[in-house]
Amino acid sequence: MPAMGTPERKPARELITFADASASGLDGSLRRAHRDGRLVRVRRGVYRPAAAQEAGTKAERAAARYRDQVLAVACNRRDPVFTGPSALVLLGLPIIGPWPKDVFVMSGTAHGRRSTGVVEVARRTIVPTSTAQGEEITDVNFSLIQTARRMPLLATLVAADAACRIHRFADTPPLTTPEALHAEHERMLPYHGSQRMRPVLDRVTIGAESPLETLSGLLIEQLGFAAPRRQVAIEVPSGVVYVDFYWEEADIVGEADGDIKYRSAGTGAGAARRVIDENGERMSCASRCAAWPGGDGETAGGGCGRRVAPNGWSRARIASSESCSAPASPGPVAGDGCCRFARTGLRRSNGLRCARKGVPTP
């Protein structure tokens, strides 16, 4: 939605500018702090405390560094409008893989240009805007499209799934919907790089609970496995649980269990416990299961996706009703979570047969 006037500028996250220090007579102190390693230069004339780099996971630190780059540009430019991945990082949306080196802003004209570390995106259509972290950004749909034009499918799809996600445990509304993303794409046509957005539109879902789940779904497709159903309700002794992936003919479920699923289960007491209890019930009735290390896929590791299929499994087995066997030596996916496939031995709820949270069958 269009922004109502110029957004109020809030202080950038723990950033210190040389201009502000000089105006206060503290430029000497700033130089000493930088020389001593207490301050790190983010961009020319903009610094941050060195300790600010140390908090969070590897993925969170990478996102924080790129967010600082974006906010540093805000310190040096007059009323920038951020777009693409620069807008997504201000919205707190995840990606898989490295964040770009450049910061993306909207040009004031119909022509784009590039300067040191900043890409100005040509303004060739009406650009809806909103605000995030005190900065003006293009709205989430426009930003996702600009991201798709410049970044790999996986990075954009992870962000799109996160933006469209309908939370099962929290009341947080989604930032957008697949329908709104489709509509913005159609509104902008024709535009350069539009073909890169089509694979995102074909795959975006409201049910992916983590970047690892998005990564798993894409790799299942790329490896040639039969297409599973997503977020299927299965009856267990205590009620009904949802599984991430379900191969109906083979009666196999798959669970992408990265840490982010537990962290995002809500803020109330016992929110993460609900996820743990659900996972225990999903797997306790399985006759056999296979597990291998896999994190939330927020950053691309060296072995990411190289051996997603457990040793001894084949495309034919996952597509048939043959029993599953545990791998002799699990292959890494990324990080420290777990992506598991198991033979259910369960029956689906009669009242919730094929129930999915609005997720289209792949």
Image: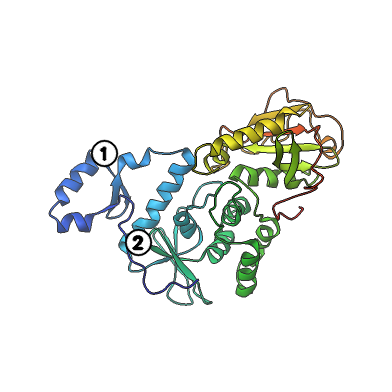
The colouring scheme, among rainbow, by chain, secondary structure or one colour, is rainbow
User: Which residue occupies 44% across, 56% down?
Assistant: 90
Specify the amino acid type for callout 1: Gly
Neighbourhood count class around disc 1 (C-alpha, 10 Å): few under 14, some 14–19, many 20 upward: few
Asked if the residues shown at circle 2 and circle 1 are in contact, with their CB atoms under 8 angstroms apart, the answer is: no
Q: Earlier in the sequence, mark 2 or mark 1?
A: 1
Q: Position of residue 153 (x, y in %)?
A: 63, 54
Residue 313 shown left or right of residue 184 in the figure: right
Q: How many marks?
A: 2
Task: Work out which residue is located at the far left of the displayed protein and give it.
Answer: 25
For numbered disc 2, what is the local secondary structure?
helix
Residue 4 shown left or right of residue 187 in the figure: left
Q: Looking at the image, which is closer to me, 266 or 27?
A: 266
Q: Looking at the image, which is closer to me, 106 or 216?
A: 216
For numbered disc 1, what is the local secondary structure?
loop
Neighbourhood count class around disc 2 (C-alpha, 10 Å): few under 14, some 14–19, many 20 upward: some
Task: Work out which residue is located at the far top of the displayed protein and give it.
Answer: 328
Residue 4 seen by the camera: yes
Marks 2 and 1: which is nearer the front? Answer: 2
Q: Position of residue 351 (x, y in %)?
A: 79, 47
Q: Measured along the vertical axis of the image, is residue 34 above or below residue 77?
A: above
Specify the amino acid type for callout 2: Ala
Q: Measured along the vertical axis of the image, is residue 145 above or below residue 2?
A: above
Residue 38 shown left or right of residue 189 in the figure: left
Q: Position of residue 225 (x, y in %)?
A: 79, 42
Q: Position of residue 329 (x, y in %)?
A: 69, 24
Q: Which residue is mark 2?
A: 74
Q: Which residue is mark 1?
A: 37
Q: Looking at the image, which is closer to me, 344 or 43?
A: 344
Q: Looking at the image, which is closer to me, 112 or 199?
A: 199
The Cα atoms of the two marked residues, 2 and 1, are separated by 24 Å
